[in-house]
Structure formats: structure tokens, C-alpha cells
Amino acid sequence: MKKLILALILCLAIAPVAYGQLLDDMKAKAKDKATTMAKDTATAIVDDSAITAEIKASIFAEDSLKDSKISVSTKKGVVTLKGTAKTKEAKDAAAGIATAAQGVKSVNNRITLEKPAKPVKKKAVKK
């Protein structure tokens, strides 16, 4: 009986130590995962900013797009183009520039074509 009681006391004495070690291991793993996720998020933000900057510079340098009003945003490698272009060719050129940029996963082209100005009708002058 004494041996059983001693065994139980020993188990009760060791249990908190084992539990504490298990808890410490779980905390360390959670911290490592959080650190990795934070680094990955920071890298994605930097990459997205670099992609956006590269596309904006290329659009600005393209003669056929100089008069266009195009905004560029990037999230997780997905580029969204918004704004207006004068021609379908200009719209397609902007999409081509975005697609060719390094790190781009896909392009969401929301550029619309500018509507041509309506001609002003001259009123007939009565004599």
C-alpha cells in the first residue's frame, strides 16, 4: 500500500512539470507560427507595392496611355486596373503591361472606354 501511495504522490509531483513543459512547447510553436505569418504578410505587402510601382511606371512611359486616367492596385499578386482609356487598344495595352510585370498572378481589368464628346449642334440663325 505504501508503494502505491508513493507512486501516486510521485505521479502528482511530476504531472505539473510535464504539463508545464507541454504548455511551453505549445507557446513556442504558436509564437513561431505567428512570426512566420507576420513575415509572410510583410513580404506580400512589399511585393504588392513593388508590382504596383512597376506597372504605374510602365503605363506612364507608354505613349498610347499618357492621356489615360488609370489607377493600379495590387493585393496578393492580383492587379486591378481602374479608370478610363481613349481606345480599346490603349485598354488592352495597359492590361498587357500589368500581365507582363513580374509577380503578377492575374489582372482584373476594369478600365472603361471614354465616351466620345457629342458634337455641339449649331443653332440656325434666322435672317
Image (spheres, grey):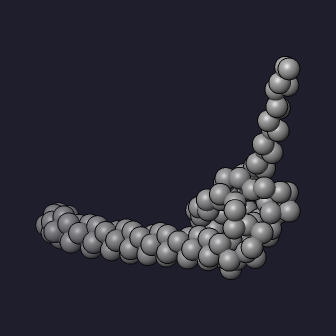
Q: In this picture, is 6 found above or below 118?
A: below
Which residue occupies 78% across, 69% down?
Answer: 64
Query: Compared to 40, does 75 lie above or below?
Result: above
Which residue is the extreme one toward the top?
Answer: 126
Please give left or right for residue 120 compared with residue 77 in the image.
right
* Location of residue 19 in the rendering, given as x and y in whole percent from the top left corner: 26, 66
Task: Work out whether residue 31 or residue 103 is closer to the camera in this orientation and state it.
Answer: 103
Residue located at (71% from left, 53% from top): 84
Q: Residue 6: x, y in percent?
A: 15, 69
The residue under the point 20% across, 66% down is 16
Visible residue check, residue 89 = yes
Which one is in front, 55 or 61? 61
12 vs 114: above or below: below
Q: Is residue 46 left or right of residue 80?
A: left
Quarter that holds the C terminus: top right
Q: Name the foreground residue: 40 vs 73.
A: 73
Horizontal placement of 1 versus 113: left or right?
left
* Residue 89: x %, y % from top left: 86, 62
**Quadrant location of residue 22?**
bottom left
123 sits left or right of 60 in the view: right
Instruction: Residue 78 in the image: state x and y as whole percent.
Output: 66, 63
Q: How many marks?
A: 0
Indicate whether 51 appears above or below 110: below
Q: Name the residue at 79% across, 35% down.
A: 120
Residue closer to the observer: 52 or 36: 52
Confirm whether residue 36 shows in the render: no
Q: Quadrant of the N terminus?
A: bottom left
Residue at the extreme front: 127
